[in-house]
Image (spheres, rainbow, N blue to C red):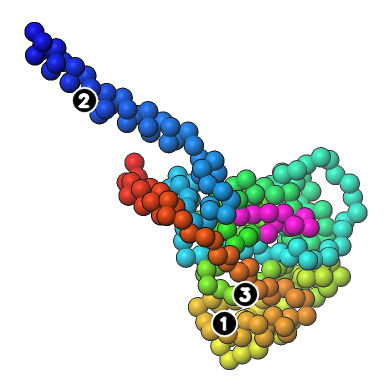
Amino acid sequence: MIFLLTILAGLVLVYFFLFIFPSKSVDKEIAYSGKEIFSKNDLDIVYTESSAHATNMKAVVKCSPQRSVAAKGFTYADVKDCRLFKNVYESESKCRWGCIGFGSCVPVCPQEAIVIESHTAVITSSCIGCGKCVDSCPNGLIELIPKDAAYYIACAAHGGDMMKPVCSNGCTGCGKCNTSESDAFSVKNALAKINYRKDLQAGAKASAACPAKCIVECVKKEKNSFKFWNLCYRMLHNGKSDD
């Protein structure tokens, strides 16, 4: 009798550790998000697979927080969503291509890498290039470029010379950025373009030649102190297969 009770108790323990305890551990794991476990500085080193995947790209906003834009001079209702504002008013300034600035892209980023500066979205060095923010902009201003790119065009306007009285940093398509034989910089539809597959050593020279100052140097990647538990957590999550 004692032998049978011992076997029964052993089976109960095996069942508990195989089925009950793992399920509770999984529930506890799901209950916490990356934002609760890690500090903001650590989010670019470690991230949950359910939130984003790091790539060899980075996101930039094709608009400048340094811009001075001519306003339309109208008042509007209390709309604080970029997509809704776009549908109703199109733009609060005379530049219909620029950043609307209400930050609809901010909560989309799992890395908290997007901030609003001077009514313009800015992507910080915490970006991992997951691309989740790209479709959130109604003006299509967020673009993924190679992670090692040094410069990008901080403008999406196609107004040509008409941009001069509209925006202080609006591209006029003058072509002065094409300063090298590599043809990395060109103009299409009155807007400067960068071919990231070509030699970009002339980036600094092209930026200096731009009268609108819309060829902007990419934000430098900040160095974070690496921690051993960061590596352990990432290895555990990378080892899991997708359902």
* Residue with the mark numbered 3: 151
- Decide: marks 3, 1 in contact (CB < 8 A)? yes
Quarter assignment of residue 73: bottom right
Mark 3 or 1, nearer chain start: 3
The answer to whether 195 is drawn above or below residue 76 in the figure is: below
- Decide: marks 2, 3 in contact (CB < 8 A)? no
SS of the residue at dot 3? strand
**Could one spot residue 105 in this view of the protein?**
yes
Give the Cα distance between marks 2 and 3: 59 Å
Tell me if 189 is positioned left or right of 237 in this view. right
Instruction: Indicate the amino acid at tag 2.
Output: Val
Instruction: Indicate the amino acid at tag 1.
Output: Leu
* Residue with the mark numbered 2: 14
Quarter assignment of residue 98: bottom right
SS of the residue at dot 1? loop
* Residue with the mark numbered 1: 200
Q: Which residues lie in the magenta part? A: 113-122
